Amino acid sequence: MEHQGQFRVTGVVLYRKDLSPTLRTLYVWCREKGAFWVFSPGSGRGKIGRAFTEPLVWGTFHLYRSTRGTYLKAMDLREDFWELRRSPLRVREALQWGGLLKKNLLPEHPEDELLRVFYWSLVLLREGAPILPLRWRFFWKWLSLWGQAPDLWRCENCGRPLEGEDVYLHPQKGGLFCSACTPLPGEFQKAESVLRELRRAVMLSRSDFSGSSFDLESWQWEQRTHLLEELLGDRC
Ligand SMILES: [Zn+2]
């Protein structure tokens, strides 16, 4: 991070808080810099449009850092994802992702790959992609970058490749298991079809994902995604 002076960074507003009618503070997440707070004086009515300093807005921030803090001087808007706001369901989803990122990102620690995953997940959300598989896809890719995603190709316990029908899941455990590692059959469920859909959700290219439909029920996505959220929560 620069000590003092002017610099420019590209990224997204994750969160904003109005300290007064004329002073807004933003939590921004930027390429090569990570996440950090900036003051945005006058963003309520000044030269930086109020809409530029809302969560989910992407752009290049022109910043000035002094001993008192970092200040937003100007902004070049890249993408405001304003269309998302037409769907309460989709904008709520996007804001929840932003909130989780704000909670989990280490301040001033670059996470450029995850930043890209977030951006392209928002694009899919805007394009009308199915929300529950998309939520799974985003969280799984996020955890994968942090080396914590459940393995979709090998048994969680013994590492044997998961193939054919020999796949089981546990309702309260994130990973998938082979038959040799399911000593209490009543607690485990056959998961061949679930695994196929989980894999599709993370493996499909963005353009293929956008128009796809998925075979799992809502509760199945929610159960699997909840386990990913727990993995994220455990980090706090
Ligand atoms: Zn096993």
Image (cartoon, rainbow, N blue to C red):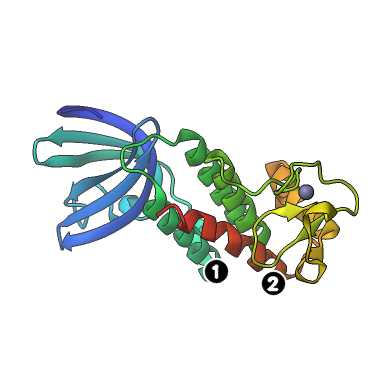
Circle 1 sits in a helix, a strand or a loop, which is it?
helix
At which x and y percent is residue 201?
72, 51
At which x and y percent is residue 16?
29, 56
Q: Which residue is mark 1?
A: 89
Disc nearer the start of the sequence (2/1): 1
What residue is at 72 percent from the left and 49 percent from the top?
209
Query: Cβ–Cβ below 8 Å for labels 2 and 1?
Result: no
What residue is at 39 percent from the left and 39 percent from the top?
11
Q: Quadrant of the C terminus?
A: bottom left
Instruction: Give the camera-side residue of 31 and 57.
Output: 31
- Establish whether ligand 1 lies closer than 8 Å to the Cβ of label 2: no
- How many labels sit on residues? 2
The disc labelled 2 sits on which kind of residue?
Trp
Q: Work out which residue is located at the far front of the displayed protein and give it.
A: 183
Instruction: For label 2, count other residues whose C-alpha is less than 10 Å away and answer few (under 14), some (14-19) or many (20+).
Output: few
Q: Which residue is mark 2?
A: 219
Q: Work out which residue is located at the far right of the displayed protein and give it.
A: 164
Is 193 placed above or below 118 here?
below
Is 55 placed above or below 86 here?
above
The disc labelled 1 sits on which kind of residue?
Leu
| Residue 44 horizontal side relative to residue 11, left or right | left
Which of the two discs, 2 and 1, sits closer to the camera?
2
| Residue 20 horizontal side relative to residue 129, left or right | left
What residue is at 62 percent from the left and 61 percent from the top?
225
At which x and y percent is residue 148?
56, 45
